[in-house]
Image: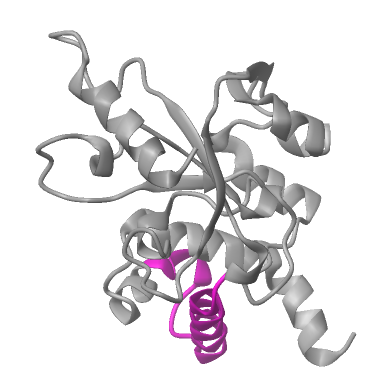
Amino acid sequence: MTYSELKQKLREHNENKPQGEGYHENVLTAEVTFTEDSFSKPFSHIERTYRFTSNNKAFIPGMGGYSIFADCLDGIDKTVRIEQYMAAEKGGKDGWKIESCKLVTNTVTFNCRYCGSVDTSSSEYIEKSYTKEVTTCYKCHDKAIVESGLAMISKMDKYEQYYTYLDGLRESGVTNMYGAAPYLQIEFPYLTPKEAQNILVNWMATFKERYKERIGA
């Protein structure tokens, strides 16, 4: 399936919804895997695959905006506006190139190991990942990252830019870093509050590991 065919299926799904059914009901789920050479560092298949649903503005007719929010299957890179980085969308000739894409139909259900809530994931993700990292719902992923010490490897130069800014902000002592998200938005006005908070959480989760690399420990 090509990306154009996938987009068409998601749009047709929304166009043909029964009267009274909202766009957040009965959604379709899709996954796109980007090529290895789209990134400056090597990443596994899971780390290059992002999942999104048909209720994104890009697939809804007549919407006033255009966005595709997606979560990486590694459980770390979340709520990413991938249309800004995709060569097939608005990422330009140097954007992320598509290796494959598909609709996800083979999902499995599990209970979050933190809060006990029921969540779903593709069976392919379960088979290729460590169970202890998979069985957390999206709300508990940040807790899982911090507890298990998972290091987020930046997937684009912009992440390094965010981290460098946060490192400098920390050294300046201007603010307690738990309240640094608004400073990120001032420095990078295109970030939404949620994106700024996610970057801050990942900066905190990876700080020790990155600091060790910086001092050569």
Q: Does residue 75 appear to the left or right of 200 in the view shown?
A: right
Q: Does residue 161 appear to the left or right of 184 in the view shown?
A: right
Rendered residue at 55%/36% (across/down):
138
Q: Main secondary structure of the magenta part?
A: helix
Residue 22 shows in the view? yes
Rendered residue at 75%/72% (across/down):
208
Rendered residue at 51%/50% (across/down):
78
Q: Does residue 107 appear to the left or right of 132 in the view shown?
A: left
Quadrant where the C terminus sits is bottom right
Q: Which residues are magenta?
A: 155-181
| Residue 143 in picture, x, y percent from top left | 65, 44
Front residue of 187/101: it is: 101
Q: How is the image coloured?
A: one colour
Front residue of 57/204: it is: 57
Extreme residue toward the right, this view: 217
Rendered residue at 82%/81% (across/down):
212
Front residue of 216/7: it is: 7
143 lies above or below 85: above
Front residue of 31/176: it is: 31
